[in-house]
């Protein structure tokens, strides 16, 4: 059985530029990807099924072989697992963003300018002090936190349609609060924090808590049981780590893996290579490309892709030259919109045993020109595992 490496640059793909210009993946210098493409199958993959949220909570499990239609996986409880939090049957876990609100009471930034821990702490402590006895705030890092709610009717809370903040730029505050009318404890917590001095950011924007992605503890079959292979996950964000925990994968805590543009790319590659000594399949997740897409930073996204190429793929290819590689993204995060998109993502299935073809630059355009379309994330993983059998 050969080793399989699935390298996922979150949100790496973009839509075609309306003006005919390059996407970040087209523009970026990616010699490793281009070299790997000589012995590869490339194409497009539908990681996000119709009517499913175009997010990592859908696309990443799909690439791990878990059908989004069969397994509903809200962010909150997955991130709780990523933090090592045990959940009771009556617990509802909400992802809790710190966002910024502008002078017109509209959502300005889903990450409050990627707020640092020092600035986030006073507001988070205020939230802890205001929390009802049925609510428990869990501190994370930067803008990412959690809220655990003991609930008499978890199904009722889980059924609420709460918009994701990264998809809600410009949303009026009143519209968001209206979504939480049936959860008065949450409304009181949010409005209570808004009135405190701690809610004023240095730039004059108001900081606010935005709960969303709520759900109960997920139940998934173990990856090894499903696929007959041991597996591990290298990731910096709690969501990816939580998905790994839910599927029985190893997922080490790695110093310096921050879940943003400043993450330790090379450390991820080193840890992935070491995990391949004891596991047959290793997933490597990079968040930086997604964040740059959300911020609509074209040049930053190019740099993140280039570092993915040079500091993750290059050393992994050197360390594991005979492994089967899948390189792809879980969903699109186009810089044109700054929002997730459900369109098919470019992928590469690399294996040195495949025929040598003329060199080409791996990007959305060349992937589409191949004419190969894989119908789902599980189907792409099956193709890779079959190649590595």
Image: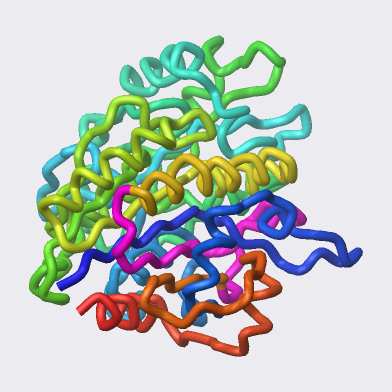
Q: Is residue 74 visible?
A: yes
Number of residue marks:
0
Q: Nearer the viewer, residue 321 or 166?
A: 321
Q: How far across and down, in percent of the image, does residue 56 sit? A: 43, 58
- Specify whether 322 is left or right of 194: left
Q: How far across and down, in percent of the image, does residue 293 sit? A: 64, 48
Principal SS element in the magenta part? loop
Was residue 340 drawn as part of the magenta stretch in this picture?
yes
Q: Is residue 76 visible?
A: no
Q: How far across and down, in percent of the image, does residue 73 sit? A: 31, 63
Q: How far across and down, in percent of the image, does residue 188 sit? A: 43, 32
Name which residue lies at 50% across and 31% down.
98
Q: Nearer the viewer, residue 356 or 21?
A: 356
Name which residue lies at 29% across and 80% down.
387
Colour pattern of the rendering: rainbow
| Picture quadrant of residue 100 | top right
Image quadrant occupied by the N terminus: bottom left
Q: Is residue 355 above or below residue 241?
A: below
Residues rendered magenta in the picture: 319-344
Name which residue lies at 26% across and 83% down.
386
- The residue lying furthest to the right in this view is 19
Q: Is residue 325 above or below residue 25?
A: below
- Specify whether 153 is left or right of 285: left
Image quadrant occupied by the C terminus: bottom left
Q: Is residue 229 above or below residue 147?
A: below
Was residue 47 drawn as part of the magenta stretch in this picture?
no
Q: Is residue 36 above or below residue 255?
A: below
- Specify whether 106 is left or right of 208: right
């Amino acid at each position: 059985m050969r080793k399989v490496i699935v390298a996922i640059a979150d949100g790496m793909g973009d839509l075609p530029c309306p003006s005919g210009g390059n996407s970040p993946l087209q523009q970026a210098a990616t010699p490793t990807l281009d070299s790997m493409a000589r012995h590869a199958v490339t194409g497009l993959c539908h990681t996000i099924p119709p009517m499913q949220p175009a997010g990592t909570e859908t696309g990443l499990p799909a690439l791990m072989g878990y059908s989004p239609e069969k397994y509903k996986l809200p962010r909150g409880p997955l991130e709780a697992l990523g933090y090592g939090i045990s959940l009771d049957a009556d617990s509802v876990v909400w992802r809790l963003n710190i966002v910024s609100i502008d002078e017109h009471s509209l959502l300005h930034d889903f990450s409050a300018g990627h707020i640092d821990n020092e600035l986030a702490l006073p507001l988070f402590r205020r939230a802890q002090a205001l929390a009802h006895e049925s609510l428990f705030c869990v501190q994370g890092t930067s803008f990412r936190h959690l809220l655990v709610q003991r609930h008499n009717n978890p199904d009722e809370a889980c059924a609420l349609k709460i918009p994701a903040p990264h998809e809600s730029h410009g949303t009026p505050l009143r519209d968001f609060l209206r979504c939480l009318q049936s959860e008065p404890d949450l409304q009181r917590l949010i409005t209570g924090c808004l009135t405190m001095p701690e809610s004023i950011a240095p730039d004059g924007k108001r900081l606010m808590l935005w709960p969303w992605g709520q759900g109960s503890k997920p139940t998934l079959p173990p990856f090894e049981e499903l696929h007959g292979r041991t597996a591990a996950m290298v990731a910096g964000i709690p969501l990816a780590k939580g998905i790994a925990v839910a599927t029985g994968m190893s997922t080490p805590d790695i110093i310096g893996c921050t879940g943003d543009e400043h993450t330790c790319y090379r450390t991820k590659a080193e840890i992935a290579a070491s995990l391949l000594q004891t596991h047959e399949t290793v997933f490597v997740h990079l968040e930086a490309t997604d964040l740059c897409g959300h911020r609509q930073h074209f040049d930053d996204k190019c740099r993140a892709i280039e570092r993915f190429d040079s500091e993750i793929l290059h050393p992994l290819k050197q360390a594991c030259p005979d492994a089967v590689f899948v390189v792809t993204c879980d969903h699109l995060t186009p810089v044109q919109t700054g929002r997730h998109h459900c369109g098919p993502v470019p992928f590469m299935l690399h294996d040195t045993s495949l025929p040598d073809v003329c060199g080409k630059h791996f990007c959305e355009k060349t992937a589409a020109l191949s004419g190969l379309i894989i119908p789902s994330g599980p189907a792409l993983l099956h193709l890779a595992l079959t190649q590595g059998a």
